[in-house]
Image (cartoon, rainbow, N blue to C red):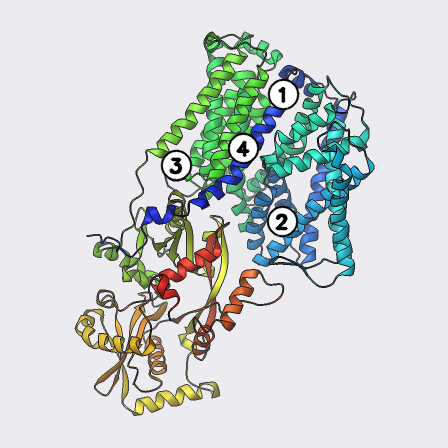
Amino acid sequence: MVEQRGADAPETEEALTRPRGAWLRRLAGPLLSVGMLCLALWALRSLASQVSYREVARYVHGLENHRIVLAVLLTAASYGVMTLYDWFGLASIGRKLPRAQVTLISFISYAFSNALGMALLISGSIRYRFYIQAGLSTAEVAKVVLYCTASFWLGLFALTGVTLLLVPVPPTVPLAGWRIPVAIVLTLIPVLWLAGSHVLRQPLRLWRWRVSWPSTSTAARQILTGAVDWGLAAWVLYLLMPNAVDTGFGHFMAIFVLAQIAGLVSHVPGGLGVFEAVMLAGFGATGNEGLEAPILGALAAYRLIYYFLPLCAATVVVLAREARGVAGKVPLAPWFTGLLPPFFAGLTLVSGAVLLFSGATSALPGRMEILRHVLPLPVLEFSHFFASMVGMLLLILARGLQRRLDAAYVLTLVLLLLGAVLSLLKGIDYEEATLLSLLALGLAPAHRLFYRRASLFSATFSVGWIIAILAVLGCAGWLVSFSYKHVEYSTNLWWEFSFYHGGAPRALRALVGATAVGMLFALANLIRPARPQLRLPGEEELARALPLIKHYSSAQAHLALMSDKTLLFDSESKAFIMYDVEGRSWVAMGDPVGEDEDARRELVWTFREQCERAGGWPLFYQVRPQDLDLYLEVGMNLLKIGEEARVKLDGFNLDGKSKKVLRNTINKLTRDGMRLEIVAADRVPALIPQLKTISDAWMRDKGVREKGFSLGTFDPAYLARTPMALVWKGEELVAFANLFLTDSKEEASVDLMRHLPDGTSGVMDFMFIELMQWARGEGYVWFNLGMAPFSGLQNRRTAPLWSRLGALVFGRGERFYNFRGLHKYKDKFDPEWEPRYLAVPAGIALPLVLANIASLISGGLSGMVRR
């Protein structure tokens, strides 16, 4: 039988949906981006009302080769300057990494963040994951990311401010009257940053943040690097602009930097639409009426050269490196193999968007003329229709690749090849076919990276991801409207099939087909089986878990036997996670239990997805250093929460001056007739009345209540599942502790420990010493004394805020818990201190999470304020 959760526990659905404001906060950012995108597309349509798609395409195809080559070279120079952000950032914290590694990480991060937008989120997350694996601490990675971000904005502010001060803005441009005040403010920011680094030596306090000033040379290097980067980016577009737009580089720069700031502030991925609308409005206000089509063509070419081309170059670099790794010529480092799944996911997303956008526009007339002579019309129509459906499927499968699903890998590989063939059949679009084929070629040998056997419908789609797919689909719809706005709509248009005049009907049908695929997938997700209610494990589940517990390397896995936590098994019962829910926090106790690494890794993904479907926060409490890659792989952050004391038994003894007090205590108590007895689990039920008497007396004396979750409680059913250590004084039982013993003899530990309050002093010291000596005689390698919360956290000026806060609690939190005393007591047994971490998703309310964990351990909110 499965036991139902008690009435005092949080109700799963209600508890998880209670903070309705959190949903609004999660939706606000993505919805704002979509709103700005819609506004920008509306503005573009209004500004280019007399422009046809063919005019734009004609300008792009008519660009001179020497201008394109020079623009490509300047783009390469700009991305080369971007790598200096990372080099100088690492130098500022005194760290040095291999040149190839830093260059590749920097180039990949900027190729993605420039093309997809959300620079801080995308490039910051890439840097965090791979610099952590390269040996940097969380604080060091944060400093590098902060350095790069500050350089990016300082350079933009400096370039924008100086340009607006020197170059008048046309009066018809919005906010032109504010040019001088805006220029002064933007110029003052880098000037003050530079002056502060030269004059001030004390850190600047901004609310609860403290900003340390860089050296003067570092500050100047930040501003100069950022300004050169932005200057090169502007030069690329200036080369591509039509010759008839003759406003001078200064006027061009003024409009360019304002458009870039508008695109960045809008939070629309890549500033798509927003940047173009501001540029078009700016040049239209400078007397360039009638040049809307060439300007839009230059902007389209700029997108292709400055954003899409580096993305393709990054693809080639990564694929070439992976191919060499498969051939065994270059061993792939863990940081590189960890980069590949999100890299392939991003490229798949881009490939799907390319197919949708291609399906929304008309094919080149010359290519259509060739197809008319070699291809039947039905083949063309079906190819166009299914190519857009493949594009929508790739948008969906990109999420599966990010989650490392095996089924997503196979389907993506098939669809990429199918999309390449369809691209050739629908318009001889060899550019798209080449992109898709290259991605398929790189993806093919990477099967080992997509190891999860979970269903595609198990992959959760975040709000941001859903809105990204809808945004791509919306842009495709806008392209259909823009490309064929001069075509009069009628119901007969849907059924028109023709080589020469069938572009608009084909685009409409393709858009409907892609939308239908997305809606069917969404419907399939909505009607999937409901998430099962959380239930406490019964005897059958505990029996399934017991072999895994006994063979696991950590004795703390025995906490599952308390039956106060839900057990989540993998499909083959090779591993399980024990967890409980408090508020929105789904807290897993420790690492996944089991020896099968694939099953343990899959469980981390499954647990996270289960939490996301319920709107909860997945947390892993007290995880070990050797398993940190499990959580980094799913994009979680790690916070050190303390250290665990483990005694190496083969070197443990009572010799030496430092053990004199312990040695004297043990000798005295032994002479007084104290002895240790180990009893098997089947003998424990008969001892429960005696044990309860000791437990009740101990709790009355301490004035405490029973804890839970990570600590044992006096539950007869739980105690009867483990062996027991008994301490006798003559014929009187004075203390007891239940034992956690692994069959592998890797580790022994204790959980619930109680003793008579009026018993002999030193009884717990006696118990620990005797247990360690007994465990050593039984062949155990380690004896686990448990964790000391907040131990080992640093309170240095350069330490992250979390570490300093934890160190403060450790040193001054005696009012709530004996943190320092607990560490001191365990330390006298000369243990090896091993760090323990809390794995959390990014962007959570950390104080609330910590309160939820404390509530679980303390048995409720009232227990948090009682000892």
Nearest to viewer (mark 1 / mark 2): 1
Circles 4, 1 touching at the beta carbon (< 8 Å) = no
Which mark is first along the chain, 2 or 4? Answer: 4
Residue of label 4: 34
Amino acid marked by disc 4: Val
Circles 4, 2 touching at the beta carbon (< 8 Å) = no
Residue of label 3: 456
Amino acid marked by disc 3: Leu
Amino acid marked by disc 2: Gln
Q: Residues within 10 Å of mark 1 (few under 14, many from 20)?
A: few
Taking the image as shown, residue 624 lies to the left or right of residue 61, namely: left
Which mark is first along the chain, 3 or 2? Answer: 2
Per the model, the C-alpha gap separating discs 1 and 2 is: 46 Å
Residue of label 1: 46
Per the model, the C-alpha gap separating discs 1 and 3 is: 41 Å
- Name the residue rendered at 73%, 17% in the picture: 290
Residue of label 2: 101
Nearest to viewer (mark 4 / mark 2): 4
Which mark is first along the chain, 3 or 1? Answer: 1
Figure check: 246 above or below 717: above
Per the model, the C-alpha gap separating discs 4 and 2 is: 35 Å
